[in-house]
Amino acid sequence: MILLFRKGINASASKLDPSPFRPLTNLNNLDLSNNNIANIRENTFEGLVNLKVLKLQHNNLARLWKWANVGGPVLFLKGVPNLITLQLDSNGLDEIPENSLRGLHNLSELSLQNNLLNSLKDSVFDDLTSLQVFRLQKNLITTVRPEVFKTPMSNLSLLAMDKNPFDCTCESILWFVSWLNNTNMTALPGLRDQYVCNTPHAYYNRSILNFDTLSCKDITPFQGLFVLSSTAVMMLIVMALLVRFHGWRIQFYWNIMINRTLGFSDANVEEGRNFEYDAYVIHAKEDSMWVERMIGPLEKETCRFCWEDRDAVPGKSIMESIVENMKNSRKILFVITDSLLNDPWCRRFTAYHALHEVIEASRDSVVLVFLQDVHDYKLSRSLFLRRGMLRSKCIVDWHGYKERVPAFHQKLLIALGMTNRLME
C-alpha cells in the first residue's frame, strides 16, 4: 500500500491523537514531503510495522530533534523499525539525537542532504549496519571521524558527502581520506571536484584527495610526547596540591611508620651526663594557657618538662633556680610569640641564660615552637637566634587546627628526642 500526501496534507493533521495512520497496518510507502510539517507526535507512526519507505523531505522538523525542545527530542521513528528508505532532506536539521535512529537495522538508504548538520554524536549511526546509500551533501560537516561514520560506511555502495566545508587536518579528515583511498566503492559522485577543503588556508579550495596523509605520521611521536608531558604536568599539579593541603598528613603517617621502627629519639645514651628534665620551657605569661593545654599532656605520657613556677629549686632565688634547672634539662624549648619577644624578663634574663647554657655546654639543644609567624630579623634582635642556626626538625610550627594536634605532638617529640650534637 502506498500513501502519497506530497503538498497535500494540512500541517495541523500531524498533531492529531490518536494518529490517523494507526489503522494502516499494511502501509509500506508513505510520502509526506513538501508539507511544511513542524510537529510530529512520538506515536504518529506507531503501528506501521510494515512501512518500508518514509519521505519527509522539505518540511520543518529541526525543532523536533533539538535537545532544547520542550520535553526533549521527539523520537518519532521508533514506531517504524522495518524502514528501508528514509528521506529527511531540507528540514533545517542541525543536530541528530543519539537515539533517534535506534533500531533501524534494516535501513539501506538514508538521505540527510541540504541540512545544517555539523557535530554528530559518536553512536548516532551505530544501528545502521545495513546502510548502502548515504547522502549527506550540502551540510556543514567539517570532521569525518571513525567513531561516527565507521559503522554506516562499512557496507556502502553509494556515498554522497560533497559540498561540505571539510577541515583538512590530521584530527578531522585523516581517517576519511584513508578510507577513500582504500575503499572499492565506485559510486562517489563529485569526489574529484566537489569534496573540497575549507580550512586550513594551505588546503583551501583544494580537493581532500590532495591532503598529505604522510604528514600526520610525523606528529605521532609528538603526540606521545604531548601525552607524556601532559600527564607529568597533571601529576605534578596534583602532587603540589596534595602537599599544599595534606602535606602534614603525609609527614605525620611517614613519621609514624619510621618511629615505630626506630623510636622517637636518636639521642646517644652517652651524652656526657644524665638530665633530670627533657626540656626547660620558656614562654610568655600570656601563653601559659596554650602551653598547659597543648604541651602539658605530653608530660603525662613520655616527657618531663621543667616549668619555671612549679619546679623552682627550694631555698634558692628565682634567678639561681632558673640557671640550675636549665643545666638539668636536655633541651630548652622556646614558645615563640610576639608576647615572648616583647617580654623584658624573658629577653634580658631567661633567654640570655638559656643561650649562655647552650654555648657553655657546647650543646645543640634549642627547640623553637612557633605559635605565630615571626620574622627572622625580629627573632634575632630579641633572642639572638635565627631559624638557619637550627636543624629543621628542631623548629615546630603550630597551625591552630584541632585535627593537627597529633601531628604537632609527634613533631615535638621528634625534636625533643634528637641528640644534642657537639657544635663545631
Image: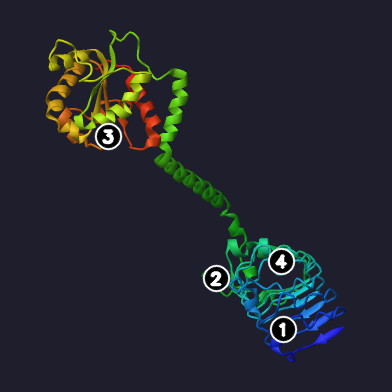
Q: Residue at x 77, y 88 (%)?
A: 5
Asked whether 364 or 338 is in front, the reply is: 338
Q: Residue at x 14, y 27 (%)?
A: 347
- Camera-nearest label, 2 or 1: 1
How crowded is the residue under tag 1: few (<14 C-alpha within 10 Å), some, or many (20+)? some
Q: Is residue 186 left or right of residue 58?
A: right
**In this figure, which residue is indicated by the disc labeled 3?**
371
Q: Please, what is the three-letter code of the amino acid marked with disc 2? A: Thr
**Marks 3/4: CA–CA distance:** 66 Å
- State the image quarter where residue 313 is shown: top left
Between marks 1 and 4 in the image, the one whose residue lies nearer the viewer? 1
* Mark 2 surroundings within 10 Å by alpha-carbon count, few (fewer than 14), some (14 through 19), many (20 or more): some
Q: Is residue 117 above or below residue 288?
A: below
Label 1 element class:
helix
Which sits earlier in the primary sequence, circle 2 or circle 1? 1
Q: Which image quarter: residue 375?
A: top left
Q: Earlier in the sequence, mark 4 or mark 2?
A: 4
List x then y, in percent, for residue 229: 50, 47
Q: CA distance from mark 1 to mark 4?
A: 26 Å
Q: Would you say the residues marked 2 and 1 are in contact, meaning their CB atoms lie under 8 Å apart?
A: no
User: Which residue in the structure is indicated by mark 1?
Assistant: 14
Seen in the picture, residue 343 relative to 307 is either above or below; the reply is below
Badge 4 is on which residue? 125
Q: Residue under label 2, please give it.
A: 199
Task: Give the side of residue 131 with respect to residue 236, left or right.
Answer: right
Q: CA distance from mark 3 to mark 1?
A: 77 Å
Of the two numbered discs 3 and 4 on the same chain, state the one appearing first in sequence: 4
